[in-house]
Amino acid sequence: MYLSLAFIRFLESLPSALAVGLLLMPRLVGEDGARFKIPVAAAAVFRALLGFALLYLIARAIVPAERPIDANLLWEFTFGTSVGKAWVFTQLVAFAFAGLAVARLFVTSSLLDRVTLWTGVGVLGVVSVTGHAIDDGLPIWTQASFLLHTAAGLTWLGGLLGLVWWMFTAHKKPPEVAAQLAERWSMVAKIAVGLVAVTGVAMAYENVGSVPNMLATPYGRLLTLKLVLLCAVLLCALAIVRYMHRRPAGDGFNVDWVGKVGSLEAFFGLGLLAIAGYIAVITPASHETNIYWPLPFRLSYIATWGQKPTFPAPIWWWGIAGAVLTVVAAMIWWTPATREKRLYATPAATIAALFCLAVSFSTEAYEDTYNDPTQDFTAESVARGMAAFQENCVGCHGAMGEGNGPMSKDLKNAQGLKIEPADLTAPHVGTHTIGDIFHWLTFGGQSGVMPSFSHVLDVDDRWDMINYLLMLSSTNRSRFIAPQAMIQWLIAPDFALVDPKEEVTTFFKLRGKPALLSFARCTAAGEEKKELDASLLKAAEAAKAAGVSHVTVYTGDCPQAAKGREALHPAAVEKAYSIINRFPNVPYTSEIGQAHFLIDRSGYVRARFKQFGEDDGSATQFAAQAGMMAQEPIVEINLHSH
């Protein structure tokens, strides 16, 4: 179905683009364009009629397969859905263009020609509104980018096809007219391609999501191929421009050669259009769930140079080679004695330099490296992952994941070499993507000692364990969380909230302003209870005064006035946050006697208060930190940021 829809979009776009090109070419050299009137009218009418086939295929792609497409359903789809209404709009514009193009067969008017041309450009632009541009969840600037990108790209392609047509049919025209047309079209093409580039970046920002998605998703791989074809198009255009600039004054203009190179450029352009028609109807990379990384390596600063490798590690030699080759490329380009060879030697040296630098930033990767989790990063998921870890991993990695389990001393690989289990609390965990960890849990570890857990843990269980490992990898640094705000690095797990109104049902929905997350176990008596109650009441008062959200996870007989929003699963939330509630030289416990985490607007844990004493200055310090965080910009959290 996708191929059928893409093919119709290709056929729909091509005639209207050609019509615009044939309207534009004569205007660039002051011709009346009479010889192109019939082809323009035929292309415009064909485009308008083909729109009905597009409507049927769009409906067939959206309506469940078991429902037949009859006249009543098609009518309901056309006028009852946003996609159908968008199609109606495009058809009205297309028929207006067809009517104007047919009118030109009987009326000769410069005004009519201009109106027809700009209506045709409008037809090219509205092609996008039956694709991803119809998504009303996209920002306005992105939706506008779709329109401009499509209009500019198809105007360029149509103009190129029109130029080739003009070159091969203008046998009676002087070569000087052909040269003038090529030069003027070159200026129009530069503007169009510039618009395509700028709007393409804006669209990719929303639709691709990340650089790895360019290779890890079907959408991204097609977009990469589209960029390759664009490079081929630009090389052809560069050849024509170089010819025009180097042509001696007075020499004839080689219409045949320019026409042939233009034909090759148009061939690549048609490939661009075919790919564009297909990616307009498939799932964008940023929403893709079928992510497959095709390379055995990936580029990462954190996993390579970020680990501060010692000299003379291989990474250093690759980096040095890249730097030397960069200098060589620059010297070849700028040294007068080598300028004759610079067109070949400089690119070769530059490619070699880029290769060496890429190797120095390379680290191992797998097909799952950029996989997205099936389980959200929630406290409930972390608690489940913690239980799975205790059942399956303690023997080697130890109860706290430090690589000191009871079996750790006797582990050997197939070659009989001793293998030490990884310390999962060490910084090296942060050099791997969560997809890497999923791959090891599924197929076994790098050492050959760690077995596959795919037969023990299903996919969701593995992602639960990964969420736990993400928390566990933060334990060493989390020991030093203090009332003084730290940088954004520790993500606060989401969790469900109790809300009778069903408005704020998760902790995540509180993002946008700072939040105070308070834990306490009110099980003591006497003076200890009075001191704890006073601290909790002080925390509630401080949160209210600072204008931050207050969420409480309290166990036992805590003061009602001290409570804020409450967790739906308090035991899971306490267990998850206990992982980062560490202190130097203090044994770990899954129970939190009292702790108050300050979470910023983006969802990062930034500070921790042990208690809110009467005269210890905690409330004042909290107010200052909360006020500062309220002014900070919101940062989008990405678990694939390694």
Image (cartoon, rainbow, N blue to C red):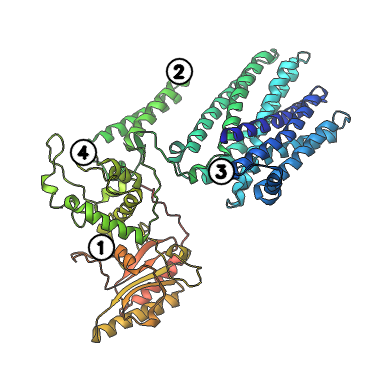
Return the disc, 4 or 3, that comes first in the chain's sequence.
3
Element marked by disc 3: helix
In the picture, the quarter occupied by the N terminus is top right
Please say if 445 is above or below 593: above
Q: Position of residue 206 (x, y in %)?
A: 53, 46
Q: Position of residue 521 (x, y in %)?
A: 28, 75
Nearest to the observer: residue 636 or residue 177: 636
Frontmost of labels 1 and 2 is 1
Return the disc, 2 or 4, that comes first in the chain's sequence.
2
On the image, which quarter does residue 357 sit in? top left
Return the disc, 3 or 1, that comes first in the chain's sequence.
3
Q: Gap between marks 2 and 4, in whole Å?
A: 51 Å
The residue wearing badge 3 is 203
Return the disc, 1 or 2, that comes first in the chain's sequence.
2
Nearest to the observer: residue 66 or residue 527: 66
Image side of residue 214 versus residue 260, left or right:
left
Nearest to the observer: residue 21 or residue 317: 21
Q: Position of residue 251 (x, y in %)?
A: 69, 12
Image side of residue 96 versus residue 320, left or right:
right
Q: Gap between marks 4 and 3, in whole Å?
A: 43 Å
The residue wearing badge 2 is 341
Frontmost of labels 2 and 4 is 4
Q: Gap between marks 1 and 2, in whole Å?
A: 60 Å
Instruction: Check whether the beta carbons of the residues at disc 1 and disc 2 lie within 8 A of each other.
Output: no
State the mark number for residue 479.
1
